[in-house]
């Protein structure tokens, strides 16, 4: 059992709350990506789990065992960092076997079996006998991973292992990593600020902001139902559009209206509603249509450019609101000046003044 349980965990550097009173459980045997913008506390949290950083407050458990004050070497974890850790003068297989040789209880046959397994899992067969100095950065990183896998720890922690790889190497590594995690039973925590990586690898994503985990979900669910305006903004390329509605007080609550809503929405009194609440919709969920027969809104184009995959990204304006729309190439080419947009109401999210979903 190797779930990772954090109880009221905090880490402060002077006045900076890098990890802020976190209570949270990373499930056993799953890949959880810690995702969030630079400085939100991902690496500090990983280092606390790994025992590389001292805790200011709180407790960490691996399964039933409290590990808060146990040294890194006694936590039975593997770690992979941004830079591959390999001995350049040693072959792939010797690099993988090295830490196993220090484990006295393993026989030669057991070491060989583990090395063979790790080499197969990371698709390193072709490079088995080659010196690491002759291998590319991505293969060296795969060796770093294979070495941790061969040790068979309960938990493996990854700290942005793709940061220093070029785009092609990233793709290569992602394929190897995905194949690996489908077979591994270890609990994996993977830090990244790259949402594509998180979406590709994770069973669950923990979205971090200001030292806290603000949402924890399966990748699709997190993307489709962001529980905060931060989640809507951070996930997506580009993220969610936000519209400021008009808010009127009524006898029993509020009435929220906006050109993008088919009709005003009534909210009860207890909601945290003010002019700073927002309506969010993703650029890919706004539909460009030929005319306003279905109540579509006339909007004006400010800018258009081609996004990855040949899609067009349009910047458009309605009143004071500027927003983005993603459309297919054939449609994007023909749009100019003014055009019509539909805003499907089931794709519109309401967020209160604090950014929490209403
Ligand atoms: P990045 O993606 O840029 O690495 P991150 O989400 O991993 O960011 P952390 O590196 O954990 O964030 O940093 C969280 C906060 O703690 C930041 O404000 C950072 O400046 C601060 N911090 C991290 N390590 C230290 C340290 N050793 N001393 C002082 N402040 C630190």
Image (cartoon, rainbow, N blue to C red):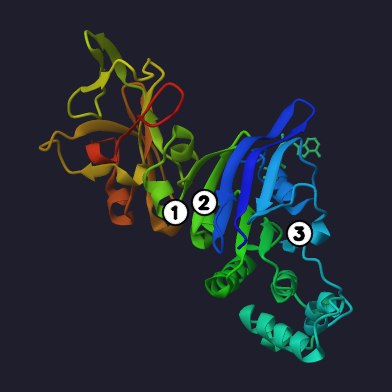
Sooner in the amino-acid sequence: mark 2 or mark 1: 2
Q: Residue furthest right?
A: 89
- The image shows residue 191 at horizontal and vertical percentages of 64, 52
Classify mark 3: helix, strand or loop: loop
Location of mark 1 (residue):
218
Report how far apart the C-alphas of labels 2 and 1 lie in the structure.
6 Å
Examine the image and state in which quarter residue 280 appears. Answer: top left
In the rendered image, the quadrant that contains the N terminus is bottom right
The residue at 26%/21% (across/down) is 267
Q: Determine the quadrant in which ligand 1 lies.
A: top right
Classify mark 2: helix, strand or loop: strand
- The image shows residue 126 at horizontal and vertical percentages of 69, 88
Q: Is mark 1 within 8 Å of ligand 1?
A: no
The residue at 27%/19% (across/down) is 268
Give above or below for 263 relative to 126.
above
The residue at 70%/47% (across/down) is 43
Report how far apart the C-alphas of labels 3 and 2 lie in the structure.
24 Å
Dot in front, 1 or 3: 3
The residue at 25%/29% (across/down) is 260
- The image shows residue 226 at horizontal and vertical percentages of 41, 41
Q: Is residue 161 visible?
A: no
Q: Residues within 10 Å of mark 3 (few under 14, many from 20)?
A: some
Which numbered circle lies on residue 209? none
Location of mark 3 (residue):
75
Q: Residues within 10 Å of mark 2 (few under 14, many from 20)?
A: many
């Amino acid at each position: 059992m190797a779930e990772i349980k954090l109880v009221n965990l905090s880490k402060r550097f002077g006045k900076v709350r890098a990890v802020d009173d976190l209570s949270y459980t990373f499930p056993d045997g799953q890949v959880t990506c810690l995702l969030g913008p630079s400085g939100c506390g991902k690496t500090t949290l990983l280092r606390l789990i790994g025992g590389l950083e001292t805790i200011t407050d709180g407790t960490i458990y691996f399964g039933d065992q409290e590990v808060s004050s146990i040294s890194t070497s006694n936590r039975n974890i593997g770690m992979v960092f941004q830079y591959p850790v390999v001995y350049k003068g040693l072959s792939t297989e010797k690099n993988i076997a090295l830490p196993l040789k220090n484990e006295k209880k393993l026989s030669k046959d057991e070491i060989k079996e583990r090395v063979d397994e790790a080499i197969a899992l990371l698709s390193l067969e072709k490079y088995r006998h080659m010196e690491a100095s002759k291998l590319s950065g991505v293969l060296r990183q795969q060796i770093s991973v294979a070495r941790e896998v061969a040790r068979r720890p309960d938990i493996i922690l990854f700290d942005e292992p793709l940061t220093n790889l070029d785009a092609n190497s990233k793709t290569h590594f992602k394929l190897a990593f995905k194949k690996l995690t489908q077979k591994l039973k270890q609990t994996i925590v993977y830090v990244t600020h790259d949402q594509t990586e998180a979406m590709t690898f994770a069973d669950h994503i923990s979205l971090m902001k200001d030292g806290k985990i603000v949402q924890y979900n399966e990748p699709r669910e997190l993307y489709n139902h962001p529980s905060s305006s931060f989640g809507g903004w951070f996930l997506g390329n580009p993220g969610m559009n936000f519209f400021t509605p008009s808010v009127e007080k009524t006898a029993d609550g509020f009435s929220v209206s906006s050109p993008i809503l088919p009709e005003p929405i009534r909210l009860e009194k207890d909601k945290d509603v003010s002019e700073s609440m927002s309506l969010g919709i993703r650029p890919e969920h706004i539909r460009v249509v030929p005319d306003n027969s279905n109540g579509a809104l006339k909007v004006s184009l400010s800018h258009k450019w081609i996004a990855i995959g040949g899609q067009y990204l349009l910047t458009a304006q309605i009143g004071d609101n500027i927003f983005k729309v993603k459309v297919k190439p054939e449609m994007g080419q023909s749009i100019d000046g003014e055009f019509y947009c539909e805003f499907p109401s089931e794709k519109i999210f309401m967020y209160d003044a604090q950014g929490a979903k209403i």
